[in-house]
Image (tube, rainbow, N blue to C red):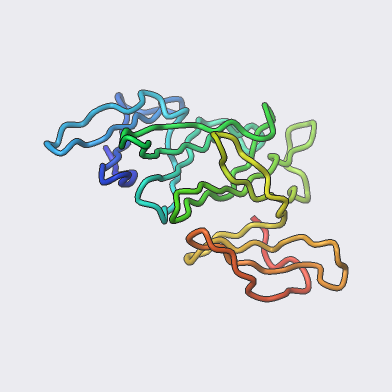
Amino acid sequence: MPGLLGIVGRTPIVTAFEKEPDRSTPSVLFELEADGTARKLIGDAHGSIFLRWPSSSPDALVFLAGLSGGVCYSTANAGVVSAGAGGELEVSFPRSPFGDEPTSIRSLQVAADGTVGGTLAPIGCDEEGYPEDEPPLAERYLLKDGKWEPTGVKGFDVQTASGTILVEEVEDPIDPGSLFVESAGGRELATAVEGPVGRP
């Protein structure tokens, strides 16, 4: 069944499969033109689209796509649909900042000005392919010129209905954690905490 992924530049973006899907069937992206015609944007979304986040910008949206690979061999990719300077729609898949190492994409955001941000971490598995007891800290990244640039803000990331809560790691032992709420591109200090209050 086709599904509405979102609206970018006043154009509806629809995701569907070209055949009955199995675990290796990629999603296909279409844009719906004013007369109702569905025009294919890309024929392979780097896997099946399984998650998207609300966007605060009318000119971009983000989603996750991947194939079945197991927790320690994640194939998840972040996808971005954006409206270019001339209004043409563009689809991009930024490369992981960890190279070929499987990546845990814990959240993605699009600010009102179109800036794409994400909370990413190494997958956190040992050499035998089992999850580590303590997951690695996530770090905030911003997408600049098609590449993820680290912000230096690290911590544990938790999704809520109103935004993303980040328990930030700091060096001062008297103030071991700070709770930040990030929503619509803003970052506001909510309160200080005496330790981690949430994990991914």
User: Residue 196's spot in the image, x, y percent?
Assistant: 74, 66
Going 32% across and 44% down the picture, which residue do you hit?
8
Going 41% across and 32% down the picture, which residue do you hit?
91
Res. 191 image quadrant: bottom right
Q: Is residue 22 above or below residue 155?
A: above
Asked if residue 1 shows in the view, the reply is no
- Residue most extreme to the bottom: 191
Res. 18 image quadrant: top left
User: Residue 44's spot in the image, x, y percent?
Assistant: 40, 25
Q: Is residue 119 above or below residue 93?
A: below
Going 36% across and 39% down the picture, which residue do you hit?
83
Going 45% across and 53% down the picture, which residue do you hit?
113
Q: Is residue 195 above or below residue 4?
A: below
Q: Is residue 169 left or right of residue 118?
A: right
Q: Is residue 159 above or below residue 130?
A: below
Q: What is the quadrant of the N terminus in the image?
A: top left
Q: What is the quadrant of the C terminus in the image?
A: bottom right
Asked if residue 57 shows in the view, the reply is yes
User: Residue 48's spot in the image, x, y percent?
Assistant: 43, 33
User: Residue 110's spot in the image, x, y percent?
Assistant: 47, 51
